[in-house]
Amino acid sequence: MEGRAAALGAGTVLNALATGSGAAFGIDVETRATVELDPDRDGVAGTITEAPDADTALIERCVELAVDRWGNGEGGTVRTDSDVPLAAGLKSSSAAANATVLATCAALGLTVGDGGDSVGDEGGSGGAGAGRNTGASDDPDVTRLDACRLGVRAARDAGVTVTGAFDDATASMLGGVCLTDNTEDRLRAREPVDWDVLVWTPPERAFSADADVDRCGDVASMAELVDDLATAGRYTEAMSVNGLAFSAALDFDTDPTVEAMPLASGVSLSGTGPSVVAVATPGDPDADLDALADRWGERPGTLRRTTTRNDGATITETTNEH
């Protein structure tokens, strides 16, 4: 019983640490998971290909919860490999959780799709279809939002997130821009977007669970402004306000954000950092990500050019033999 799936990394529009409201958007970087289940095996063993010594509690917990809910408590193995750097603010944990849950569903022989979910109805998706190869979208065994919520629960159990990161998880699972209430794991809105993306990731790493929540609370009034902008569909403006506010709150240099402002449609610290993500929207005459890449390229770290994605996480292969 083997399943494989892939889920997206994401960038931030609104950090949820201050108010519980968050927003994020899927980008074209992926984490892939392979899950092998064995009814005769006890427990789950995980491996992170690019970081063999990293903590595997999250992906193991995802498999455990999934087989407890939809299977018969099978044991097995889970292996992930990723284009999303760990602890860089690009939602590596959400991508790993989503890919693992979907791969487990695939190994169990379950169909996954959007079903009848809709925005405002139990936090449903209300957006585009089920994505490539996720299964029947009209009456699936598991909805993508149910799978997403299970991954969020696993992240809380594993202690890798402060808020549960439902905003990051929905952007990774569904694609597009997702606005959420993380206190209720509710999807408030989702909209497809078509942006070019430039990511600068400095050499240091920052783990979400270590973020200073109290200090983030000090910028709650700015977060509320960002929420208002995002709710009105002014996502790129929201990003830039968020970037300045949370760079300051989380003690990151604001210079990269300021440098990007004349050359990007929007720019923000992503998650709890340290990556900074800039976007260019179609038709913006002032956006010049090539010029920004030259500017950011003078800083230590790595640059990545990519785009937004609206299809979200996908099951890529299923082999289910009992």
Image: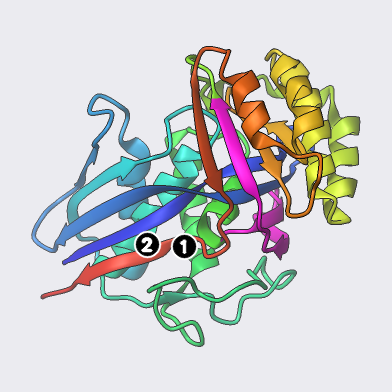
Name the residue nearer the viewer: 187 or 85. 85
Circle 2 SS class = helix
Q: Is residue 18 visible?
A: no
User: Which residue range is magenta in the image?
Assistant: 175-200
Q: Is residue 128 magenta?
A: no
Identity, as a three-letter code, of the amino acid under mark 1: Ala
Compared with residue 210, is residue 266 higher up or lower down, i.e. above or below? below
Looking at the rendered structure, which numbered label has been put on residue 71?
none
Compared with residue 54, is residue 134 higher up or lower down, i.e. above or below? below
Rounded to the nearest angstrom, the CA distance separating label 1 from label 2 is 7 Å
Question: Where's the C terminus, which quadrant?
Answer: bottom left
Looking at the rendered structure, which numbered label has been put on residue 102?
2
Q: Residue at x 84, y 25 (%)?
A: 219
Q: Is residue 198 magenta?
A: yes
Residue 108 spot, x, y in % from top left: 26, 70
Q: Residue furthest bottom?
A: 138
Name the residue nearer the viewer: 256 or 34. 256
Residues at circles 1 and 2 in contact by the CB criterion of under 8 Å: yes
N-term-proximal mark, 1 vs 2: 2
Residue, disc 1: 147
Circle 1 SS class = helix
Please tell me whether mark 1 or mark 2 is closer to you in this view. 2
Q: Is residue 118 visible?
A: yes
Quadrant position of residue 51: top left
Name the residue nearer the viewer: 205 or 68. 205
**15 on left or right of 74:** right
Pointer 2: residues within 10 angstroms few (<14), some, or many (20+)?
A: many
Quadrant position of residue 220: top right
Identity, as a three-letter code, of the amino acid under mark 2: Leu
Q: How is the image coloured?
A: rainbow
Q: Residue at x 71, y 36 (%)?
A: 288
In terms of secondary structure, what is the magenta stretch mainly? strand
